[in-house]
Image (cartoon, rainbow, N blue to C red):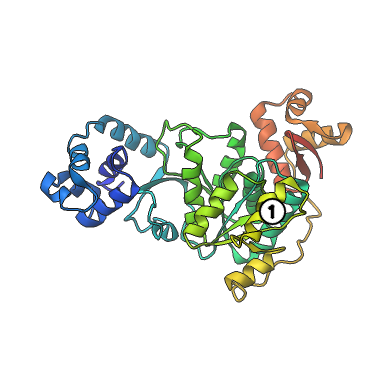
Amino acid sequence: MEPDILYQIALTHIPQIGTVCGRLLVEHFGDAHSVFKANTAQLCKLEGVGEVRAHAIHRFKSWIHAEEELRFIEANNITPLFIRSRAYPQRLLNCADAPLLLYQKGETSLNASHVIAVVGSRHHTDYGRQLTEKLIADLAPLQVLVISGLAYGIDALAHKSAIAHGLPTVGVLAHGLDALYPPRHSSLAATMLENRGSLLTEFGSGTLPDRHNFPIRNRIVAGLSDAVVVVETGPSGGSLITAELANGYNRDVFAFPGRSTDFRSQGCNELIRNNKAALITQASDLVAYMNWNNDSPLQTVRQAELFVELTDDEKKLMQLLRDKGQLSMDELNWYSQLSNSQVAAGLLSLELKNQIKALPGSVFRIA
């Protein structure tokens, strides 16, 4: 850990110092430690700082909390990415309200050649599932980095599809790294980390997934990306917020159209109608629009795996689904007599191996 990290953490713990002011201070004084060493006159010379913020810096008393955070990230192999760090995501750096400090669990390079965010409804349709899986399958030869929010629905599908095609994927969280929301995605998060993926947040440990944190999280999803793809969404929700933020950052925004009568396509249709998103129907539309054509041929046909190796737990779950048809996760727990974590891990692995299909309501069937 670099010696300045304690001061970097502390700077983010001062309520009066937001991301814009904090960035101004760091750019002027060179590093976080120098900000704390500056006197009131030096601080007040900077436009937008003023006496209130200067006094807040000098009177900062929460060093114990900053030290606790430092111990937490050291103990949990979490990498702090300060805004002046070389590893800090350069696309996000171009956003005026970029976080001063990010916490990364995992070793994914956030400065990949091609980065897309895939977002959509938490309650997706089968149409949305097909679009998500086909989009990422066809983009796989370009080795894109897939960003999403690790939420239910399209987010989870995007992460799973990325893993299935050997792509790194990053889940941006609306809370600290001492917990995971939703809890059911713990196995997915672990699988992401095992497959070159990462978890990323600007929130320190102990921060709960409060409602107001999600739009804050969404700006990071937008800012990390070259393009944001809205797969399907209703007339309101977080995906539209992400699209709006992406437009504000001059990112390219794409949306899949849907039938006018489909509730979960209303948001996408509205984005397209208002020229806030370009219409795409397949990955090649996005590739052409982004001028990524010359990087790699698109994958058009996915070779089916004829032989898939299964663990004993996976074989047990597969046999239950063959015998009984579709079953809920609770029913699989009951019939298999496996632990909750064993069932969750087994189902996720079977999904990634394309052996089973997840249905709404945490119900599963043979694919």
Above or below 343: residue 22: below
Residue 152 x %, y %: 64, 40
- What amino acid does circle 1 point to? Thr
Q: Residue at x 86, y 34 (%)?
A: 325
Residue nearer the viewer, 339 or 242: 242
Residue count near mark 1 (Cα–Cα under 10 Å), binned few <14, some 14–19, many ≥20: many
Q: Quadrant of residue 364?
A: top right
**Residue 169 visible in the picture:** no
Towards the viewer: 290 or 166:
290
Element class at badge 1: helix
Q: Residue at x 25, y 43 (%)?
A: 7
Quarter where residue 165 is shown = bottom right
The residue furthest right is: 323
Q: On the image, numbered disc 1 is attached to which residue? A: 132
Q: How many marks?
A: 1
- Above or below residue 263? Residue 146 is below
In the picture, the quarter occupied by the C terminus is top right
